[in-house]
Image (tube, grey):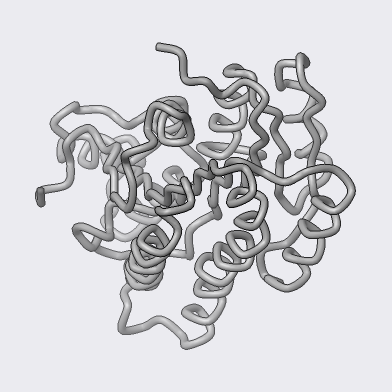
């Protein structure tokens, strides 16, 4: 299937590891010119060196704890080069723990890093998308928007807010050839999952292997996802082939989520 992504420009957030890095690699393999965004310049340079070199890929160093600084850096970048047809919003999740014991500052921080940053980036890239008559915004969230996950109280709360923001934005931008969709990863082989497994093991007294196996047993596929499998779904949603898919929450979880 030809995804018709050659000569498109993409801004991929959180792209130095895990799902973000896999997505940058997948888009670049389809002929997209990718701009990476993350806070660690050394890691950005490393990923940049791994991307297929048919295009002039680039990166922006930015910290998602400061939405306005992020917006200024991306706006300045766009003013010098071009706009973006594709925006992949992807940021590391909040730390785990029961919602009742969460500090108010944890909600503030997560809301800033996820919803506020998603919003300012969308505001920054959408004008170019409108002028091109083509735009794809894909938000990497969590299956918790369909089924809240135990021990991830702050994350469950903020992910739900992002999902509702996304659906509202999809309704507003659809007439301009811009789609806004959410990909909902289940348990995926990333550093984030390793942290969750360690926390589960320490609380239950089980080994990390036992904790991981218990998590796998809850998945009909009986395994964790590979970051590349999420990247494939994101890449399809970013393509011309997905032009009539808009405002959805797509679980990529091996069937773990119980709801429809």
Q: Position of residue 19 (x, y in %)?
A: 51, 37
When asked about the image quadrant of residue 59, the answer is: top right
Q: Image point 56% across, 24% down: which residue?
A: 5
Vertical position of residue 249 compared to residue 42: above or below: below
Q: Which image quarter is the N terminus in?
A: top left
Name the image quarter holding residue 220: top left
Q: Position of residue 197 (x, y in %)?
A: 37, 47
Q: Residue furthest right?
A: 80
**Residue 130: percent from the left, percent from the top?**
58, 52
User: Which residue is at a point 32% across and 31% down the rendered structure image?
Assistant: 224
> How many numbered marks, from 0 up?
0
Q: How far from the left and from the top, in percent, is residue 235?
A: 47, 30
Which residue is at 50% across, 44% downward? 136
Rendered residue at 39%/36% (across/down): 243
Residue 30, placed above or below residue 81: above
Q: Residue furthest bottom?
A: 104
- Asked if residue 98 lies left or right of residue 25, the reply is left
Which of 42/21 is in front? Answer: 21
């Amino acid at each position: 299937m030809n995804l018709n992504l050659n000569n498109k420009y993409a801004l991929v957030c959180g792209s130095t590891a895990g799902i973000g890095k896999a997505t940058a690699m997948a888009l670049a393999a389809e002929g997209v010119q990718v701009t990476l965004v993350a806070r660690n310049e050394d890691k950005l340079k490393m990923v940049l060196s791994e991307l297929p070199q048919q295009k002039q890929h680039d990166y922006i160093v930015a910290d998602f704890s400061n939405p306005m600084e992020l917006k200024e850096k991306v706006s300045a970048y766009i003013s010098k080069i071009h706009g973006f047809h594709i925006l992949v919003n992807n940021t590391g999740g909040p730390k785990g723990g029961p919602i009742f014991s969460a500090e108010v500052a944890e909600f503030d921080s997560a809301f800033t890093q996820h919803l506020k940053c998603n919003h300012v980036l969308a505001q920054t890239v959408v004008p170019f998308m409108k002028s091109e008559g083509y735009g794809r915004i894909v938000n990497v969230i969590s299956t918790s928007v369909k089924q809240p996950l135990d021990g991830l109280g702050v994350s469950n709360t903020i992910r739900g807010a992002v999902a509702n923001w996304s659906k509202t934005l999809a309704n507003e931008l659809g007439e301009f050839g811009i789609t806004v969709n959410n990909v909902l990863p289940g348990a995926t082989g990333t550093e984030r999952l390793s942290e969750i497994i360690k926390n589960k093991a320490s609380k239950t007294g089980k080994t990390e292997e036992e904790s991981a196996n218990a998590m796998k047993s809850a998945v009909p596929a009986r395994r964790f996802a590979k970051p590349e499998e999420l990247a494939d779904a994101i890449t399809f949603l970013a393509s011309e082939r997905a032009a009539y898919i808009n405002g959805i929450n797509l679980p990529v979880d091996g069937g773990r989520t119980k709801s429809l």
